[in-house]
Image (cartoon, rainbow, N blue to C red):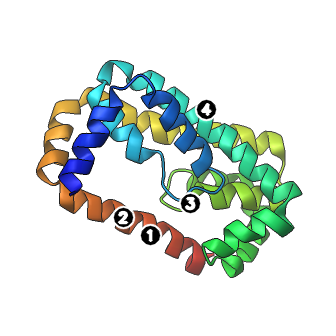
Amino acid sequence: MIRRLYDWVIGLAGHRHAIPAMGTVSFLESSFFPIPPDVMLVPMVLARRDKAWTIATVCTVTSVLGGLFGYAIGYYLFETIGAWVVKLYSLQGALDNFRAGFERYGVWIILIKGLTPIPYKLVTIASGAAHFDLFTFVWASILTRGARFFLVAALLWKFGEPIRAFIEKRLTLLTWLFLIALIGGFVAFRYLF
């Protein structure tokens, strides 16, 4: 089943609507959607290495724009939508600690958490809820999200075929590791903050 899904995603990567679809996922993931854009970014770059920089740019821009949407949810709608998103992931207690950390380490929280499996949506909503400086939030988000997506794209562009062969040979293992990292990010946020 995983192999069929992988082949399907690789096939979609060459579709004319692949980049807008990935941009939509990237935008939504920054505010409430649980699946990170890497699920589309990696196979798209593997399928179209000549478009690696375009794909990384779209992923970065749409992620930051989605981050602004998440920030707005935290800033203006925390008591309704923001609280619902946080409750959906059972992270109410962790969010309080996270918001308190913004007073002391705000920019570092955005820079570090934007690179990790800790869900970026929680960073964006918490930034808005803490009324963190919007200008700093935007430049830190561009820096951290750009670094993440351009690093992945650069590695896939440079070492595409060996990486693709590695992924295809160990697809089930890598899928499980990805799921563990994704869930681990939520767990880490809940218990470490």
In the drawing, what numbered circle is on residue 119? 3
Q: Secondary structure at mark 1?
A: helix
In the structure shown, which secondary structural element does the residue marked by tag 4 occupy?
helix
Q: Which disc number belongs to residue 61?
A: 4
Which amino acid, mark 3? Pro
Q: Are marks 3 and 4 in contact (CB under 8 Å)?
A: no
Q: In the rendered structure, which amino acid carries the disc numbered 1?
A: Ile
Residue under the image location 73 percent in, 70 percent down: 84
Badge 3: residue crowd in 10 Å (few <14, some 14–19, many ≥20): many
Circles 2 and 1: CB atoms closer than 8 Å: yes
- Which residue occupies 65% across, 39% down? 64
Identify residue type, mark 2.
Leu
Q: CA distance from mark 2 to mark 1?
A: 6 Å
Residue 43: x %, y % from top left: 31, 38
Residue 82 vs 163, above or below: the answer is below
Residue 183 is tagged as: 1
Please, what secondary structure does the residue beneath circle 2 have?
helix
Residue 155 visible in the picture: no
Q: Distance of mark 2 from mark 4, alpha carbons?
A: 25 Å
